[in-house]
Amino acid sequence: MNFKNIFSRKNRILLGELVRTDFKIRYQASFLGYVWSILNPLLLFAVLYLVFANFLGVGRDIEHFPVYLLLGVVLWSFFTETTNGGLKSIVSRASLIRKISLPKYIIVISGTVSSLINLLINLAVVVVFMVFNGVEFTWQALLIFPFIIQLYILALGISFLLSALNVKMRDIGYVWEILLRAGFYATPILYPLSMVVERSEIAAQMLVINPVAQVIQDIRYFVITEDSLTAWQIFDGDYRVFISYAVVLIILFAGAFYFKKTSGNFAENV
Amino acid sequence: MSDKAIEVKNVLKTFKIPLDKGKSLKQAVLGKGSRGYKTITPLNKISFDVPKGQFFGIVGRNGSGKSTLLKTIAGIYHPTSGAVKLHGSLVPFIELGVGFNPQLTGRENVYLNCALLGFARKEIDSMYQDIVDFAELEDFMDERLQNYSSGMQVRLAFSISIRAHGDILLLDEVLAVGDYAFRKKCFKYFEQLKRDKKTVVLVTHSMKNVEEFCERAILLEKGDIIFEGSGEEVAQKYEEMFVS
């Protein structure tokens, strides 16, 4: 895999065709089709909002909390969908890999691109919520894009790593499922980070080292409300701010390296 | 410029098969030292060349290493040691209809399959009608593949495959497809390939095909080349050894 080849014409065509297929097949047999990709995070949001915000009063001191919560849920859903898809991408295309020589990383990337498209659709729903909730639109909101790229790179790196590991050990799927479930609560999605800071500053620092938490908090800060505590504020703008970015790069390189190292033997191992 | 299309040099391919086949964490953690592997050698340091424009046959009994060899040439497997060198673009038909998805329509499958073979959308647009005509499936292109009979699927797959213009073609047992009329069409296509001086590597069990098409062939047995010669000679040898 050299960098010139990654997006050669042939590979771009293949990538496009795989993404198209993925989208066509995903909801083909279901009645509501694409609507499910919107309904899924929306329903999760509805339940969380009802239980935690309405009954338990979480997030009372955060402006526009419903949109704040929805945005967090949408971003988290993107992360889980991408990594879960990535995890299975190689194994589920075993029959293809055994029969044709093709660049394996295209398979992983194609899955993540479909998830990214899904995310954009979901963000459109968030915009609708913003209008109804009276959130002010600012130029700052455009900063969402670099952060989404950061989240995407993280998810891609994890997908490379997990998909290659999954060829060797099928347990990875179960391990990742548990990690994601724990991650949902270890990430300030349904509770405000400020609640954690009140109890323990160190705990809050541990939480925002997680790049997913850092991205979610930053996006909320720039798009919805400055009540969203960011990693920058937690670390007072010192060098520790960069830890979560470093984590993303390390995971990407480790994932790509391991994937490249093992992908030559996928055909005989899957 | 070399006049060789394929150079296979000292290719060794071994597979490690764990005796207790498992892909679980427990085994990775606990069983590392104690687990036994069985090493099998489907290709035992094989060397041969295929000159440009030759119709080349590979024959052998089941388990002799034919398919592993073909997959190694196609780049699906990486040789454990040794090397395969190709001069020219390669189109593999290890199996027909790679990447076919039963949930997609015939038309969509054509586009997907062609993309896997390395074609751009525009190129596919221009050869689409040819493919459909050759497969004789005009009325079925907008139906899902799952509603095709297996014969129809194979016909579609074969039609796509022969549109792929490569310098080197790898064919694995694709001769025996479809009904009599379609088979005749396929043989015509092979004759065409031969006339056009394409480099073709054919893996087959049919000695009739080896005699008819292959200028040269090798006979594999347990990972070794045990005989090499013209199509007729190899077919004769095969029949002497295994058919009696």
Image (tube, coloured by chain):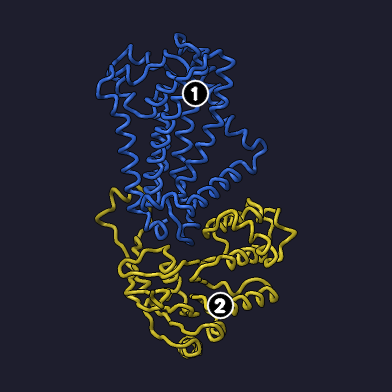
The residue under the point 45% across, 26% down is A144
* Picture colour for chain A: blue
Q: Is residue A68 left or right of residue B15?
A: right
Cβ atoms under marks 2 and 1 closer than 8 Å: no
Q: Is residue A84 above or below residue A202?
A: below
The amino acid pointed to by label 1 is Leu
Read off the chain for label 2.
Answer: B
Q: Position of residue B175 (x, y in %)?
A: 59, 75
Q: Which residue is mark 2?
A: B196
Extreme residue toward the top, this view: A61
Q: Residues within 10 Å of mark 2 (few under 14, many from 20)?
A: few
Q: Which SS class for mark 1?
A: helix
Asked if residue A260 is positioned above or below residue B209 in the image, the reply reads above
Q: Give me the C-alpha separation between circle 2 and circle 1.
A: 61 Å
Mark 1: give few (<14), some (14-19) or many (20+) Cα within 10 Å: many
Chain where mark 1 sits: A
- The image quarter containing residue A86 is top left
Q: Residue at 54% x, 60% y: name it.
A: B98
Do we see residue B150 in this rendering?
no
Q: Is residue A197 visible?
A: yes
Q: Nearer the viewer, mark 2 or mark 1?
A: 2
| A139 shown above or below A61 | below
Which x, y percent locates residue B58? 46, 78
| Percent of width and height locating residue A39 | 59, 29
Chain represented in yellow: B
Residue A71 — which label?
A: 1
* Closer to us: B30 or A141: A141
